[in-house]
Amino acid sequence: MITLYTAATPNGRKASIMLEECALDYNVHALALDKGEQKQDWYLQINPNGRIPAIVDHDNDEFAVFESGAILIYLAEKTRQFLPLYTSESPKDRSLVIQWLMFQMGGLGPMMGQANVFFRYAE
């Protein structure tokens, strides 16, 4: 069983979509970002950055994973889905998937996040 610590944000949704696609059993612990729950000591033990999402894999010695990209890679490797295994004969397949993930994490994702903030909240 996995516990997903998240909120209704694009980054939070990435982890929940991956958990669903991997057909893993999980519980959701929704954090109240507006109340600073993600900065409380108990949560900082799970994610020292004090952000969402994070997961705790109870089937793997209570292993905590934070940062959405790291969670996606962890879940893909755990289930052997969506990310080719590395072999010396074919490192290209795995690299291609990771390249697109990094593009989303460092390029497209942040730009969409900024667009959302300026469209919805900034004057």
Image (spheres, rainbow, N blue to C red):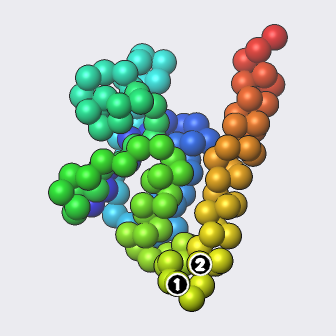
- Say what amino acid the circle numbered 1 marks: Ser
Q: Compared to 84, does 46 lie above or below?
A: above
Could you tell me if the residues under marks 2 and 1 are in contact, i.e. CB atoms within 8 Å?
A: yes
Question: Is residue 11 in sight in this rendering?
Answer: yes
Q: Compared to 109, does 23 lie above or below?
A: below
Furthest-bottom residue in this view: 89
For numbered disc 2, what is the local secondary structure?
A: helix
Q: Compared to 31, does 13 lie above or below?
A: below
Q: Mark number for residue 91? A: 2
Q: Compared to 87, does 96 lie above or below?
A: above
- Say what amino acid the circle numbered 2 marks: Pro
| Measured Cα–Cα span from mark 2 to mark 1 | 6 Å
Which residue is at a point 41% across and 18% down the rendered structure image? 36
**Residue at the spot of label 1:** 88
Furthest-top residue in this view: 123
Specify whether 93 is left or right of 86: right
Residue 113 sits in quarter? top right
Is disc 1 surrounded by few (<14), some (14 to 19) or many (20+) residues within 10 Å? few
Furthest-left residue in this view: 61
Could you say where residue 70 lies in the image, as x and y percent from the top left? 47, 52
Is disc 2 surrounded by few (<14), some (14 to 19) or many (20+) residues within 10 Å? few
Q: Image quadrant for the C terminus?
A: top right
Which residue is at a point 74% across and 29% down the rendered structure image? 114
